[in-house]
Image (cartoon, grey):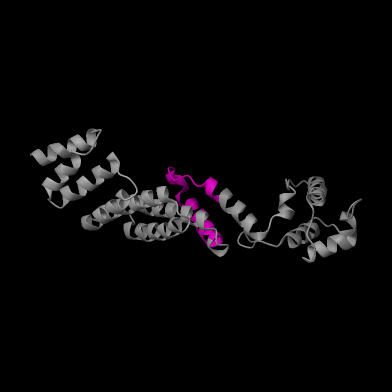
Amino acid sequence: MDKFTILKPGQRLKNLRKELGLTQEDLAGKNMSKNYISMFENGKRPISIINATYLADTLNKRAREMGIELNLTASYFVKNEKDLARDNCLDWLSRIKNENKNNKIENYRELYKIIYLSNKYELKDILAIALEKKGKLLYKDGLYSCAITHFSKSLLYYSKIKDKKKMKDVYIHMGKAYFMDLNYDMAIVYYNLAGLFGKDDNLLFYKALSYYKLGQFQIAKSIINNIMFKDERVLGLIQKMEK
């Protein structure tokens, strides 16, 4: 079945039943008639957890007899399309390993699926995460303009779900992308926007570095004075400005 096609619960049963060579009569049990199954498959009635569990167990047993491991649960026949789309997206997200360069192409593929499906079913929180992750991958590949585009889109969805922490993170990502693209003025703009959600030493360092790149050493020094913990990066920047 196409990964992008999320079937209705009854259609899921109908497809699996046929793939396993079962008729509606074969599935009918103590608490479920052929007519009940027919109505469920055609979307004319819902299914109870008890009956969904029975169906999952019966289909799992049939599949094992055919040498197939389905591992179905009752939720597969109870959840609506949006819930199942969320499950699929979360599963794909769990496979993404940003730190492993060997997985780069696969990561892009997984993110494409997640972005498509989460957009289709209006899963704003997942869409925000996927767009941010793709932005990070593009940033690592040196595609800063593309990264900024994806960060901007993720920011839109984070703002819709009012996730202020992630909004701050994305503003910083955008600032860093603009910095790497040598647009230091825009980097400062986004660092300032991130600062609206709270300042920290990392953010102050990024701002100071941007002002240093613009040759505005006095502003950079005044920002550095507000950094509580001056690590090697900060000390190195101070030394550069003192030369």
Is 198 on the left-hand or right-hand side of 17?
Answer: left
User: What residue is at 86 percent from the left and 60 percent from the top?
Assistant: 36
Q: Is residue 110 magenta?
A: yes
Place of residue 6 in the rendered image (x, y in percent of width and height, measured from the top left): 65, 61
Provide the major secondary structure of the magenta segment.
Answer: helix
Residue 203 in the image: above or below residue 128: above
Residue 195 in the image: above or below residue 145: above
Which region is colored magenta? 92-118
104 and 201: which one is in front? 201
User: What residue is at 17 percent from the left and 39 percent from the top?
Assistant: 237
168 and 15: which one is in front? 168
Is 155 on the left-hand or right-hand side of 46?
Answer: left
Residue 35 visible at all: yes
How many numbered badges does the structure rendering display?
Answer: 0
* Quadrant of residue 81 within the rendered picture: bottom right
Place of residue 3 in the rendered image (x, y in percent of width and height, measured from the top left): 62, 59
Residue 174 in the image: above or below residue 67: below
Place of residue 30 in the rendered image (x, y in percent of width and height, measured from the top left): 92, 50
Residue 1 visible at all: no
Q: Quadrant of the N terminus?
A: bottom right
User: What residue is at 75 percent from the left and 49 percent from the top?
Assistant: 74
Residue, far left: 243
Place of residue 203 in the rendered image (x, y in percent of width and height, measured from the top left): 28, 44
Q: Is residue 194 magenta?
A: no
Q: Quadrant of the C terminus?
A: top left
* Quadrant of residue 120 within the rendered picture: bottom right
Residue 10 in the image: above or below residue 200: below
Is 233 on the left-hand or right-hand side of 102?
Answer: left
198 and 243: which one is in front? 198
Is 61 on the left-hand or right-hand side of 95?
Answer: right
